[in-house]
Image: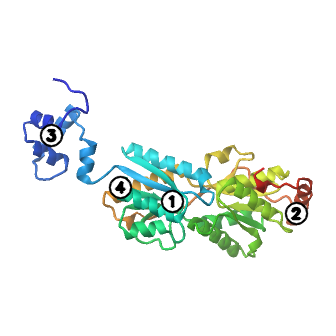
Amino acid sequence: MSRTRGSVTIDDVARHVGVAKGTVSRVLNNYNDISETTKKRILQAVKDLGYQPSATARNLKRGRQDTLGIVIPVGHGSGADPFLAEFIDGIARALDELGLDLLVTTAHSRDHTIESLKRLIARRKVDGFIVTRTEVDDARIAYLKEHNFPFVAHGRTSDPSGYAWFDIDNEATFADGVRHLYSLGHQRIGFIGGTLELNFALQRLQGYRQGLEALGLPRDEELESVQDLSERGGIAGAEALLALPSPPTALLCATDALAIGAIQFCRKFGLKPGSDVTVLGYDGLPVGEYLDPPLTTFSQSAQDAGARVARMLVDVLDGADPQALQSLARADLIRRASDGAPSMTPEALAGVLRDRLNKQPHSGNKGE
């Protein structure tokens, strides 16, 4: 008698080997009270017959849903952030390889985020959560720690203890960015970042400041522009900084999306990125390679990061110590064509842009 794969039952395996159904069950659940000879015969029969345990029965037994969750905070420009799309794709690909599913939902406020977590936990929809866009003081992480519900964070909070996380050394990376720009001849370096509620945005600003201090460059708060994390934010930040009486000759941007917006602003007003104004991004998004000019950026593979935190969460669910899974990495500088030595002094740059702004009064921060 032949059966289609998937229709074989545990009773079929037991009859094939000539043992009790309970013996087969104990082998499949890794009990160690079955002889090695019997265990090998049962596992060979499982392979030969194509037996596949029922996912529903297995999950009921383990209390697992084989589904991980992520609640995306929509705000700070993050709803349009291409990094998040790549990040989620990396999670989904890794989970697909492991035979697991991903449940994605969005929240529009802190309260809404917590309510979403509560609802998904109460309804037993997911086994654990991936938390991204971590804040300095993150209510999501506090809630999940308080209720002892499994999670892994992409990023840290002001208190990074007691949970699993994967992050980039943002301070060191952005200090490196300042040193790189200084090595090209830039001494007036602007920073375009995101809201400082986000821990990575705060860390990147701190790294920028540390880089200036290490080189003996003065800190000028006028050279720091906080925007939403979008191309529109990059346009607004570039306009705010380049319209200064003594503008920066280089723009260090907290994300590629901000850098793309800054390049758009420069090109609109006839400034050549990489020559008239240097623009440096962070994320290593694939789109950066195809810009005009191609974007120099610090590379953090969003897909690799997503896959990494997904596998970390599976390890947590399998009993690994969350504290032992904490991991800090460095980003790599990918040089393309949007960085170079300054071709004008800040004063000369101000004069050029002033003339061009006067000719085009409706500036780029309206998204034109």
Query: Which is closer to the viewer, label 3 or label 1?
Result: 1
- The answer to whether residue 301 of the structure is visible from this angle is no
State the residue position of label 3: 42
State the residue position of label 1: 132
Residue located 25% across and 50% down the image: 60
Three-letter code for the amino acid on which mark 2 is drawn: Ala
Three-letter code for the amino acid on which mark 1 is drawn: Thr
* Disc assigned to residue 123: 4
State the residue position of label 2: 350
Query: Which is closer to the viewer, label 1 or label 4?
Result: 4
Relative to 85, 104 lies left or right: left
**Which residue occupies the foreground of this view, 327 or 164?**
164
SS class of the residue under badge 2?
helix
Q: Earlier in the sequence, mark 2 or mark 3?
A: 3
Q: Quadrant of residue 93?
A: top left
What number of labels is visible?
4
Label 1 crowd (10 A; few <14 / some 14-19 / many >=20):
many
Three-letter code for the amino acid on which mark 3 is drawn: Ile
* Residue 152 drawn at (x, y percent): 43, 61
Q: CA distance from mark 2 to mark 1?
A: 39 Å
Above or below, comparing residue 292 to residue 166 in the picture: above
